[in-house]
């Protein structure tokens, strides 16, 4: 019988943690929009045996839909993670260091911190700042301790709002997410990767947009912790489980600052 991190695979089911990618889906205005066109349609070319094929052209930013942020995605005062000068590792072809192609696929335990559950709701209010105390209390509620080198998924319930573009993007009322002290709490636990349901793994205030990103600075630049954004976590939150087996493998696009990913959670049947 196959086991990974204590999970018995034959007695498990798979939850898809990726949002579906489609034209017009919610995204940050800072990134190029997702577009797909059927470049060749059935019947455009028919082989001698009557067979035909259709295929598409896909254009997308690396930070659109469910995706992983590379460590080189954010700089502070001209420096990226490890004290490297951003100007020395970037050119028009991408990053020569800290690109998403350097992210080793993650297969391992992930602790699920359900913040709405602390307050008896399904969705946190817009602009709510998740604190270090919230994370500590959610860890206790989960009954699963956060360990170095592993993953943490923070639930806000926001993925339930995916089909409400204006609400999900939070341009008027804001978006819930961790604040700086919560980011320091995660960094102190020396986790490898963190994930959340919103466009930015940050508390965004009403009308502020992505004016500042302190959580990205603390996690990516200072601590070397990758971030997964726009995850579809509500089905996992509904299980009430405090942990799962997470499979996380972004597209290895050489030099990219981020890339789409289809995370999978393995949970008991």
Image (cartoon, grey):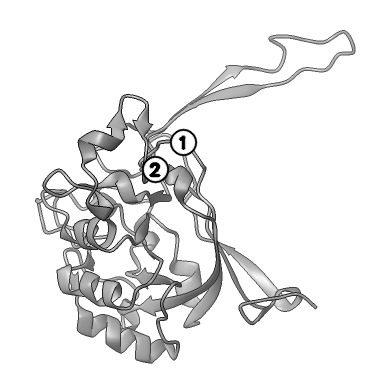
Camera-side residue of 211 and 25: 211
Could you tell which of marks 1 and 2 lies nearer the N-terminus? 2
Where's residue 43, x and y in %? 72, 12
In the picture provided, is 134 more to the left or to the right than 193?
Answer: left
Image coords of residue 262 (percent x, y): 53, 52
Q: Quick one: which residue is furthest to the right in this view? A: 49
Give the residue at x 39% y 39%.
62
**Could you say which quadrant of the image residue 142 lies in?**
bottom left
From the viewer's perspective, tell me whether residue 99 is left or right of residue 172: right
Disc 1 secondary structure class: loop
Q: Quadrant of residue 181?
A: bottom left
Is disc 1 in contact with disc 2, using a CB cutoff of under 8 Å? Answer: yes
Residue 167 is drawn in which quadrant?
Answer: bottom left
The residue at the point 71 percent across, 74 percent down is 9
Find disc 2 in the rendering and name its residue. Answer: 99
Spot occupied by residue 15 in the image (x, y as percentages of width and height): 58, 65
Position above or below: 211 against 245 = above
For label 1, the residue is 254
For mark 2, give the secondary structure: loop
Query: Where does the image place residue 269, in percent across and percent down from the top left?
Result: 67, 78
| Number of residues whose C-alpha sits closer than 10 Å to that of mark 1, classed few (under 14), some (14–19) or many (20 or more) | some
On the rendered image, what quadrant is the N terminus found in?
bottom right
Q: Is residue 189 left or right of residue 67?
A: left
Q: Which mark is residue 217?
A: none
């Amino acid at each position: 019988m196959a086991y990974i991190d204590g999970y018995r695979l034959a007695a498990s089911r798979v939850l898809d943690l990726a949002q579906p990618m489609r034209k017009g889906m919610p995204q940050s205005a800072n990134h190029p929009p997702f577009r797909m066109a059927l470049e060749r349609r059935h019947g455009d070319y028919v082989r001698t045996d009557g067979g035909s094929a259709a295929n598409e052209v896909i254009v997308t930013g690396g930070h659109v839909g469910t995706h992983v942020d590379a460590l080189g995605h954010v700089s502070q005062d001209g420096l990226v993670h490890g004290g490297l000068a951003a100007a020395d590792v970037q050119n028009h072809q991408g990053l020569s260091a800290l690109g998403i192609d350097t992210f080793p696929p993650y297969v391992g335990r992930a602790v699920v911190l359900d913040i709405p559950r602390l307050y008896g709701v399904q969705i946190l209010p817009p602009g709510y700042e998740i604190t270090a105390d919230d994370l500590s209390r959610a860890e206790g509620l989960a009954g699963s301790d956060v360990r170095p080198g592993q993953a943490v998924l923070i639930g806000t319930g926001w993925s339930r709002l995916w089909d409400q573009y204006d609400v999900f993007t939070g341009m008027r009322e804001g978006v819930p997410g961790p604040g700086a002290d919560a980011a320091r709490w995660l960094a102190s636990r020396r986790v490898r990767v963190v994930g959340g349901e919103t466009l930015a793994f940050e508390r965004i205030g009403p009308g502020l947009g992505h004016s500042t990103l302190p959580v990205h600075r603390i996690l990516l630049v200072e601590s070397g912790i990758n971030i997964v954004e726009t995850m579809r976590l509500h089905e996992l939150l509904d299980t009430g489980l405090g942990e799962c087996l997470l499979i996380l493998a972004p597209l290895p696009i050489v030099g990219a600052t981020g890339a789409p990913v289809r995370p999978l959670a393995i949970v008991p049947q």
